[in-house]
Amino acid sequence: MPAEGEPVVRRGEEGGEGEEERFLAWEESWRPWPGTRKKVRGCLLWVKAQLFRVGDDWYFLFALGVLMALVSFAMDFTVSKVANAHAWLYQEVGDYPVLKFLSWTTYPVALSAFSTGFAQSITPHSGGSGIPELKVILTGIIMGEYLAIENFGAKAVGLTCTLACGSTIFLGKVGPFVHLSSMIAAYLGKIRTSVSGEYEVRAGSQKPLYSALVALLLSSITFPPSLGQFMASRLSMKELLTSLLDNHTWSILSQNASLAKPLQVTPEALWLEWWDPRVTIFGTLAIFLVMKFWMLILATTMPMPAGYFMPVFIYGAALGRLVGEAVATVFPQGIASEGTVSLVTPGGYALAGAAAFSGAVTHSLSTALLAFEMTGQISHILPVTLAVLIANAVAQKFQPSFYDGTIIVKKLPYLPRIRSRHIGSYKVTTQEFMNTSVATLPKAATFEDVLQVVTSTAELEYPVVDSTGTVALGRQRWGFPVLPCAHSGA
């Protein structure tokens, strides 16, 4: 007889010698009030059954939305505090050029180096936006390392530091935040199905040094007392977009002789950051476009969490703003058509340019809808939609999208869409490019045969076939003239 309180193995009814062990129980449970606990447990099970009658997906999506809202709020709050501290430091150092330069460049250099170093030290998959990897995952390719919870922490912290650099580095958060949402969704799915796994942590190399050097170069160029005064470098990413979508005509406002650029950025007069009497509005917009073109390309090579959609959107808005200001200067009284005079609104051109340029870079038509949702009005729906369609048609004809290009550079396992002008690609069969030197194992293989195959190749999986003489992968249907995936050399 077992002692009191010791676990006892209970068996089935037969209790035979070979009977399997059913469960492990305590002969005497020390927990008090077993009847009350049973009733409470029954009530909780009943509540659970009632709650999940509508489906657990709703609670899953609710938790996902709440968590990502909290993450977004915390990220924006932290970025705002760090940006305000940078602006305060830049103003408090006084009129000492060296101190101003150091205060302006030290912040983005330190934040960029920390973003890259922290993210890469946890996982090397946290760099970039994550959208190319998500495209690959959505096709069915298993890439669990990109959705690991370790990657979420590295990307969240790294992205916060990247955004805190401001418009100096000229990178955004849209793409990485979509990736963060996917990682949270994958983790909640693992909790939901009670599935867990190991994760391998690999360290980075000299990537923080490269990010710091690039950040130093970009921050030096955008230093406000130097070239930065012609690029509205004191404005944040949000203020850049807000100012470019302004409905006022800057070329007309700049004709006021009493204008003066304020010592600090004022939300009521953001357009003054684009004005300089030496180069005019057109000069500052042109300098911004020329400099940001190669600066954005250089910034995309930094291996830290960052988004690329918002910078492209702002760049397109600057293009449209330049065109709109030029049209407003040529037609200061508006454009007359059939007795109706339509005033030129440069902000509308900026909106169309932003949607068209970002749509051309990403090969997406939804940028038009994004522009309407962002501005809250659809008065420019026809020109914006037309500009997006034309830009997509031209861009898709000559090059892949930015995300497809990243997939090609990273050599990710993704099959791109075959374009209509490459109709001959549909005639290509698998036999023309498949690998015929596949190591196989017959069912009758001995231990020596298996050992020889495993040691002679670096493969992780080996197909098992009936015999080495009749190697066939796929289902054979002898009634058809073609055997799918059948060959004699694999």
Image (tube, grey):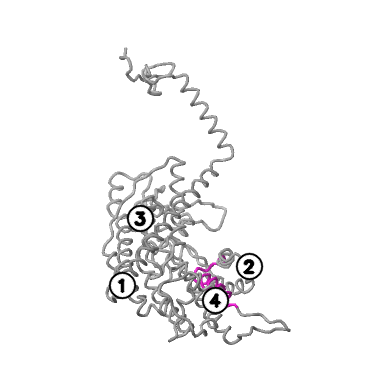
* Residue 154 tag number: 3
- Residue 378's label in the rendered image is 2
Amino acid type at circle 1 is Gly
Quarter holding the N terminus is top left
What residue does disc 1 label? 94
Q: Are marks 2 and 4 in contact (CB under 8 Å)?
A: no
257 or 155: which is nearer to us?
257
10 Å crowding of disc 3: few (<14), some (14-19), many (20+): many
* Residue at 45% from the left image edge and 45% from the top image edge: 188
- Which of discs 3 and 2 lies nearer the camera? The answer is 2
Q: Are marks 1 and 4 in contact (CB under 8 Å)?
A: no
Q: Find the distance from the CA under tag 2 to the CA under tag 4.
A: 25 Å
Question: What secondary structure is the magenta-colored segment mainly?
Answer: helix
Image location (x, y in percent) of residue 122? 31, 54
Give the SS element for disc 2.
Answer: loop
Amino acid found under the numbered disc labelled 3: Ala
Q: In the image shown, does 254 or 159 lie closer to the viewer?
A: 254
Amino acid type, residue under disc 2 in the picture: Ile
Residue under pointer 4:
394
- The secondary structure type at the circle numbered 3 is helix
Disc number lying in front (2 or 4): 2
Decide which of tag 2 and tag 1 comes sooner along the chain.
Answer: 1
